[in-house]
Every structure is written in C-alpha cells, then in structure tokens.
Image: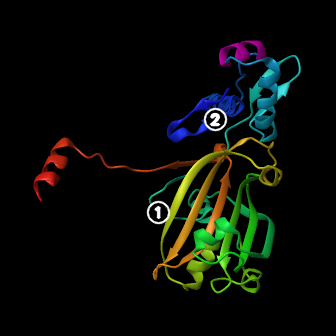
Amino acid sequence: MAYKRNHGEYVQPFQRLQVQLANLINNTTAGERLPSEPELAKQLGVSRATLREAMRTFEGQGLIRRRQGVGTFVVGHPQIIETGLEVLESIESLAKKINLPVTMGALNIAQVAANAQQAEALQVAEGTPLVQVSRVIRAQERPVAYLIDVLPEDVLTPAELREGFTGSVLDFLLRRGNPPLTQSLTEIRAVPAPSDVAHALEVQRGDVLLMFVARLFAVNGQVVDFSLSYFLPGYFKFHIVRSVVTEHAVVSNNSSG
C-alpha cells in the first residue's frame, strides 16, 4: 500500500521507512547505539528483513556501522551544506562558506538532440542540438550530488567546458558574464533514485533523493539552462523564509481598490 501526500503524490512504504530512519540517525549522537533490530522493527511497523534492507543504504553512506552481536552505531553526522532558497548559489559557493572542500567527480559532456521535456523547458524545437553536462560532486570522501545541465549550443559549447570547468555551470556562466542571468524557476521533489543516478551516488536504486528541476533565465527572457539536480538528503538542508499575511493586511489590500 502507498501513502498519499498532498497533490495526489504517493510515497511507497519503503521510502517512508527510509525517511523515518534518516530522522532517527540525524537525531542520535555519534557513537550512540540505535535500538535493537527487533525493537526498531516493531517501533516502525516493519519486518526485520525490510529494516535491514533499508539500513544498508545508511551503512553504505557511512552514517551507521553494524557490529555483529553488538548492535548498530551511529558513526557521525556529515558536515551539512545549509542554505536558503531565496538566492541561487552553486554547491561550490555554499561549501566554501563553511570551509568544506568539494570536488568534481565523474564528468560527461555530450551533444544531444532535444527530447520533448528538454525542448519544452528550453523553448526550442525537438531535435535541436544541445549540450548536456553530467557530473558528480564529492564532499567528505563520497559523492553527495549528481547534476545534469542541458543548454543550447549558442549558450555554451563543449569546447568551453573542457577548459576551467570545476563543476558548476552557474558559476561558469557568472564568471563569463554572458549572457547576463536574472532568475531561476525551480521545482523541488523527493524521488526514488533512478538506476544511473544511484550508481553515480553509490546508493541503492529507489533510495530517496531530493531533486531540483530548474530553468535558468537570462535578462532577455531566454531559458539558457535546464537542469536536474539530485542531492543526498543527509548532506544538504534547504530552507526558505516566508512572510505571514495577517488578516489586517488582507483587509487593507482588499479595501484599497
């Protein structure tokens, strides 16, 4: 049975279990032991086999260590990249603020023909030649993000990317200064990891990831970049400051017309 979220979205029980375990690990001090498997399985309402399968993900991420006959211990919390969503910044820029070294892992630059999704996002015809940049971003000795950017060839060429590119298309375009950029429209989703992304991030297929689907606009209104960004939840924390509209403000606005 799947569990329904808002807007008709469904989350499978295994993904729900992973979220519960992630919260438990994040709230447990490094070095402390988690509840025993029978106790934890009962607490979360799952079988021990299902629990072990879910815990393998966190063991693979280095967040927990299971010792036979002793128990499961939290190894330590990774340094988290935390930011508000009001301003668009690259992972490199955010990591620099907290003195966290990040590097680019596997990089693939390819020329592709626009599929239906890419054509709609970039406002071009299907089949239009595009440049696709896929790469892994690493921090704390493991991959933490997988980024895919697709751009028109008149915005960025493969030749340009092969010289001085360190992982951020945004920073590359900002340093170049052309085209001048203005804003990004971004949709945020929690998704199960596709097989290729799971392989790149060294997690299991179906593990829950945070995905940003974004369009980057130039000052002239052109969409210059369409991107899919996958983040390991345990290494990133995103937040947004939202204003509260009071009843008095609503009444004032309605009466002003």
What residue would you read off at disc 1?
87
How crowded pointer 1 is (Cα within 10 Å; few <14, some 14-19, many 20+) is rated as few
Q: Along the line of sight, which residue is nearer the eye, 187 or 34?
A: 187
What's the residue type where badge 2 is placed? Val
Q: Main secondary structure of the magenta part?
A: helix
Which of marks 2 and 1 precedes in the sequence? 2
> Tag 2's secondary structure?
strand
Looking at the image, can residue 80 be seen? Answer: no
What residue would you read off at disc 2?
11
- Residue 38 circle label: none
Q: Please tell me whether mark 1 or mark 2 is closer to you in this view.
A: 2
Residue at 65% across / 69% down in the picture? 118
Q: Along the line of sight, which residue is nearer the eye, 203 or 16?
A: 16
> Tag 1's secondary structure?
loop
| Magenta stretch encompasses residue 248 | no
In the drawing, does residue 167 fall left or right of residue 67? left
